[in-house]
Amino acid sequence: MVNTELFLAHFNRHRKLSNMNNTQQVITRFAPSPTGHLHLGHAFSAKLAYDFALKHEGRFLLRIENIDQGRCKPEYEDAIYEDMKWIGLTWETPVRRQSDHMSDYDDALNVLDQKGLLYLCFCTRKDIQREIEESGRAAHSSEGPLYPGTCRRLTADERQSRLDKGTPYALRLDMAKALALQGSEKLTWTDLRAGELIAEPDILLGDAVLARKDIPTSYHLSVVVDDHLQNISHVIRGKDLFHATHLHRLLQFLLGYDTPIYLHHDLLTDENGWRYAKRDNSKTLRFMRENGEEVRF
Ligand code: GLU
C-alpha cells in the first residue's frame, strides 16, 4: 500500500514557501528513463506529481528520458505508457521524448561554451582513478571522488594532439569559472521539505560532465533544459536526486532560466528496507498486474 497522504500535508505549505506569483500555473512532470520496467517507487513518484498538479488545478506531464539510446528500449517506453494507465494516471500529449530534441541540448551547450565554461575531457575512468591515486588527495563528495581536473590543465597543443588522434572526449563544466561568474550572489533554491537552500554545486559535484563521450548531452543538462522548456513549476522526484539539484540550480543561473520549486520525496522501500530497483522484476508494476496485485494509493 502506497501512502501519498503524508506528502499531501507538505503540499499545503507550498504557497507560503514558494516564490511563485499566484497567477503562475502549477506544472509537474514524471520523467522516467525506459531502461527497465516501472516499479512501485516510480508509481509513488508519478502519483505525487500527478496529485500535486490535480490539487492545484495544474498540468501533469510525462517525459521520456531516453538520451542513452544504448540502454533505453522501445518496449520499455511502451510499458511505461501501459503501466501509468494501469495505475490510473493520465497525462498530456504529445509526450516529450528527449531523443527528439537533441538540438535543444546543443543550443544550451553553445551558450555555456560562449561563456568559456566548458572544456574537453579525454580521460577514461581508469585515467581518473590513476590520477586520484597518484595525487593521493582527491576532493570527495557524497557521490565519490571529484574529477581532479586533469584535462582542465591541458595545454592547447596537448589538446590538439589528442583531437588529431581522434581520442573521444566529454565536455565538462569548469566549476571554478562558473562560480566566478556567480560572484558574491548566493544561488538559492526551495525544497518543500528541506526549506530554502543555498546551492553548493562545487562541493557536491565538481566539474560535472555536461556532454558524454558517447552522447552529446548528459542527464544533468537535459533535465535542466527540459524543465525550463516545459515550464515546470514544481519538480517532484526522489531524494536520490537531491544533490543533483545543487548543480541544476547553477546551470539554471548560467543559462538564464527560472528555478522551479522542488520536492524530493523519500524513496519507497520493500519490507526488508531495500529500495525498489528496475532490475528486481518481482517489484515491477507489470509483475504486480500479471499476478493480480493492486497498487492502492
Ligand atoms: N530520469 C530520471 C530517472 O529515471 C529522473 C529525472 C528527474 O526526475 O529529474 O531517475
Image (cartoon, rainbow, N blue to C red):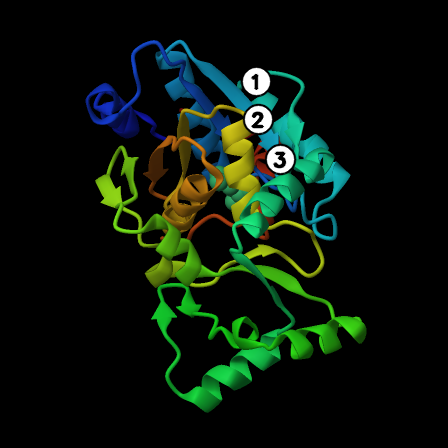
Q: Looking at the image, tell me whether mark 2 or mark 3 is earlier in sequence order.
A: 2
Name the residue furthest right.
Answer: 165
Front residue of 16 and 148: 148
Residue, disc 1 = 91
Which image quarter: residue 168? Answer: bottom right
Name the residue furthest bottom.
Answer: 134
Front residue of 165 and 181: 181
Q: Looking at the image, tell me whether mark 1 or mark 3 is earlier in sequence order.
A: 1
Which image quarter: residue 213? Answer: bottom right
Gap between marks 2 and 3 measured at Cα: 18 Å
Residue, disc 3 = 286
Query: Residue 236: x, y in percent?
Result: 40, 33
Residue, disc 2 = 62
Marks 1 & 2, CB-CB < 8 Å contact: yes
How crowded is the residue under tag 3: few (<14 C-alpha within 10 Å), some, or many (20+)? many
134 horizontally vs 121: left or right: left
Instruction: State yes or no: Cβ of the residue under disc 1 lies below 8 Å from any atom of ligand 1.
Output: no
Quadrant where the N terminus is found in the figure: top left
**Residue at the image position 49 percent from the left and 59 percent from the top:** 208
Query: Residue 133: x, y in percent?
Result: 47, 87
Residue type beneath disc 2? Leu
Task: Determine if residue 283 is in view.
Answer: no
How crowded is the residue under tag 2: few (<14 C-alpha within 10 Å), some, or many (20+)? many
Of tags 1 and 3, the one toward the viewer is 1
Which image quarter: residue 74? Answer: top right
Query: Residue 25: x, y in percent?
Result: 40, 13
